[in-house]
Amino acid sequence: MLRQVSFSVNCADTRLGFHLRVVGSHEAIGNWNPPKGLILNTSATDFPTWKHEKPMSLDEGPFEYKYVICDNDGNAVRWEERANRTIDFEKLAFSGALKPAGVVSVTE
């Protein structure tokens, strides 16, 4: 089953010409390949909040991901320096922490 997901994260470590991507173990977020990751955007008003405006479809099963600062070509400049983040929507829905359907906003 697919789940609609949007991402939003605070990151003030970028500089002009860089952007943030969600990169991880799912095809929709690049299969650990930064140039294929999900591009997050910001503006002068929103900075340091980076987000993907339109929800995307992800499988409910578990997946891992990190936030990656990338250059204009999508190449990794700096990977998030922590253990991989993990989400399992199916497990969260089963436990009652999520509604059975609807958009999930991942805000970090």
Image: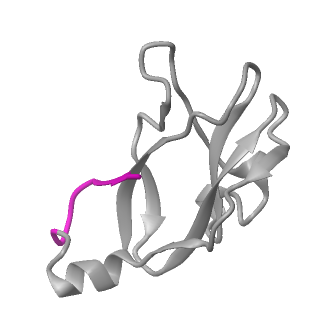
Q: How is the image coloured?
A: one colour
Which segment is the magenta one? 99-108
Q: Is residue 60 above or below residue 79?
A: below
Q: Please report the residue visible at 40 percent of the width from the left and 78 percent of the height from the top.
A: 88
Q: Quadrant of residue 59?
A: bottom left
Which of 78/53 is in front?
Answer: 78
- Going by the image, does 9 lie left or right of 107? right
Count of labels in the image: 0
Q: Is residue 12 above or below residue 42?
A: below
Which of 7/81 is in front?
Answer: 81
Q: Please report the residue visible at 40 percent of the width from the left and 75 percent of the height from the top.
A: 60
Residue 105 painted magenta: yes
Q: Quadrant of residue 8?
A: top left
- Going by the image, does 37 lie left or right of 9? right
Residue 4 painted magenta: no
Q: Is residue 104 above or below residue 101?
A: above
In the image, residue 38 lies at what x, y percent?
Answer: 61, 46
Q: Main secondary structure of the magenta part?
A: loop
- Going by the image, does 107 lie left or right of 66? left
Q: Please report the residue visible at 42 percent of the width from the left and 34 percent of the height from the top.
A: 53
Q: Is residue 41 above or below residue 80?
A: above
In the image, residue 105 lies at what x, y percent?
Answer: 32, 52
Q: Please report the residue visible at 79 percent of the width from the left and 58 percent of the height from the top.
A: 33
